[in-house]
Image (cartoon, rainbow, N blue to C red):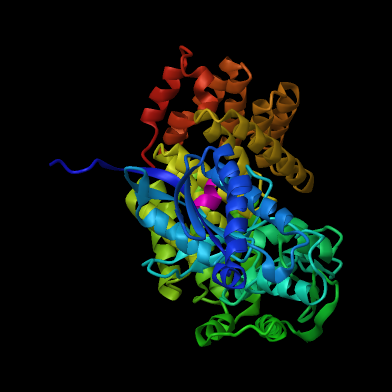
Amino acid sequence: MSAPSVHRRLAAILAGDVVTYSRLMRLDEAGTLAAWKLHRCELIDVKIAEYEGRIVKLVGDGFLAEFPSVVNAVACAAMIQRGMRERNAGVPQDRRMELRIGINLGDVIVEADDIYGDGVNVAARLQTIAKPGGIVVSASVRENVGTRLDLHYQDMGDQFLKNIDRPVHAYSVCLGAAPTARAAGADADRWERNEIEKPAIAVLPFSNMSGDPEQEYFSEGITEDLITDLSKISGLFVIAYHTAFSYKDKPANVRQASQELGVTFILEGSVRKAGSRVRITAQLVDGRKGGHLWAERYDRDLTDIFAIQDEIAHSIVDQLKVKLLPEEKSAIGQVPTHDVEAYGYYLRGRQFLHRHSRPYYVLAKRMFAKAVELDPNYARAYAGIADCDSFLFLHYNTDVSIEGILDTSARALDLESGLAEAHASRGLALSLSERYPEAMAELERATTLDPNLFEAHYFLARACFAQGSLEQAARHFQRAADLKPDDYQALLVLVGTLRALGRDQDMRRAAREGVARAERDLALHPENSRPAYLGAVGLAALGEPDRAKEWAERALVIDPDDSLTKYNVACFCSLVGEHERAIDLLVELMPHATRERKRWVQYDSDLDPIRSHPRFQEVVELLEKAPRS
């Protein structure tokens, strides 16, 4: 007899289960069975079919469904949970039937009508850590959904799930406020205890009170380091740094921020730096009730800056009654450098690096180098130098070597082996030398160590693109854009990737948001051509050629000799039909192109309109003759 047909496929798996089903059965067996059957018939089965899913199996009070689309799976789960909230409105708390849902995207083994495998097991285990009425998804689901659904996500970090041999990075889906008709008093207290199993907190950007805009980097650095410290505590949900920074320079409305971010607690404050002194104020607020739980003002020497951060973190732990594990206490107490002047230079370097132009790369490298001069054991500063050298090598053929960059990143890892920034820096350098298996290992290690690190996802997306893995590149570009709401580059580079994939609707959505972000950045930094030339490509994708031409010309006026500016304006000219000008710009660039530029010329869909142009072969021949940098 031949063996039954068994095959594998990639699927989105949704696992659902009723909370406290056994207790409900003890209270009223017949009524509970009837209610569950009604919920399934009128809501759950209907929604799964509506979103093109398939119920694989029913197990008592649980169910397993699969979807060919991960977006449909998450949208369906949200509709089911919102529907259950409406059906539970007015029902006493102890009689409500609430669901937990887990969703994973993974490989499954298909046998007849059933599915098995690790992808299914992870979905089932994610369901167990969801709050009543909640949804928990894996990182692969979160990355694939991106911004396609009107939902917010709360980063839960790595979760160690029963019978799963590796940590699974998870996100809780924030569905908004509960029904207004829910019971008050004691029932409301029980609902709140059920709703969030761990205290959830967002650190809003600390205000710069020095009166000097040049000190902005310092208040931003303090905020980011506080978020990093709190994220090391397993008993807390902490909103990612870049998500919290979307509230920068906005009037603080803690109740609104609490609702939009899906957290209960908000930490806000201010920083005033003057000479060798610093004053930091901090206050912890209950975002739902608006009451202050704790407040403190620190007037100290600047050399006490890390001690202040440590004290704030411990005060929050005490106020929220979170158990601090010994290793977490040690991690919070670990300081990146004991030299506060080196810390200041590092923060400056990080600020300059994020502006992405040749002058700023050079300036950032000087800042990081000064930090290393002051503290030769400053691992993060070495990682910063490696990034600066990589971008100078990549875009400008600057006289730096890949081996030198790898040595710098290795120095950072020797000093701090678990530093995500250093693994990301090393991965970028390896990808520039086309050592892709090693590069992918380093970059994936970086995303594991810090899933909220923008650079890790951005560098990983670049490496995927250079290898022609466009779907994977699109996922990581989108993830990077989600992590950093003020960044325009990931979205506008994503535009070309989505065009190549034929995802026109997603492309236009990314272009709209990317152009809006670029416009804000251009107003802040009119000396930087990058938002102008990337924005021009985004505007072309949106069908706004006149406005796009203005932006492209502005970029050339700002930095007429910059190779990146010329390349991206060539892409813009290709898209809007100015083919001869596009070829002219590329011909100027190709004799000096780097190896990775060859990859971009090969895969960049912005250049598709001119590939059949008689002169495009001239570009290819010049590229082949370019030095093997």
Task: For the C terminus, give its image quadrant.
Answer: top left
Q: Residue at x 84, y 78 (%)?
A: 292
The relative height of residue 482 versus residue 617 in the rendered view (above or below) is below
Q: How many marks?
A: 0
* Left or right of 612 in this view: 148: right
Q: Residue at x 44, y 56 (%)?
A: 443
The relative height of residue 152 versus residue 128 in the rendered view (above or below) is above
Task: For the N terminus, give its image quadrant.
Answer: top left
Give residue 380's position: percent from left, percent from top. Answer: 53, 68
Q: Residue furthest front?
A: 30
Magenta-drawn segment: 140-144
* Left or right of 500 in this view: 218: right
Q: Residue at x 75, y 65 (%)?
A: 205
Give residue 362's position: percent from left, percent from top. Answer: 59, 54
- Residue 129 image-quadrant placement: bottom right
* Left or right of 134 in this view: 17: left
Foreground residue among 441 and 375: 441
| Predominant secondary structure, magenta span | helix
- Residue 455 image-quadrant placement: bottom right
Q: Residue furthest top?
A: 614
Instruction: Please indicate, yes or no, whether residue 419 appears anywhere in the rendered image.
Output: yes
Instruction: Please indicate, yes or no, whether residue 344 appears anywhere in the rendered image.
Output: no
Give residue 144's position: percent from left, percent from top. Answer: 53, 46
Give residue 494's position: percent from left, percent from top. Answer: 57, 39
Residue 627 falls within the magenta-colored stretch? no
Foreground residue among 403 and 187: 187
Foreground residue among 554 and 174: 174
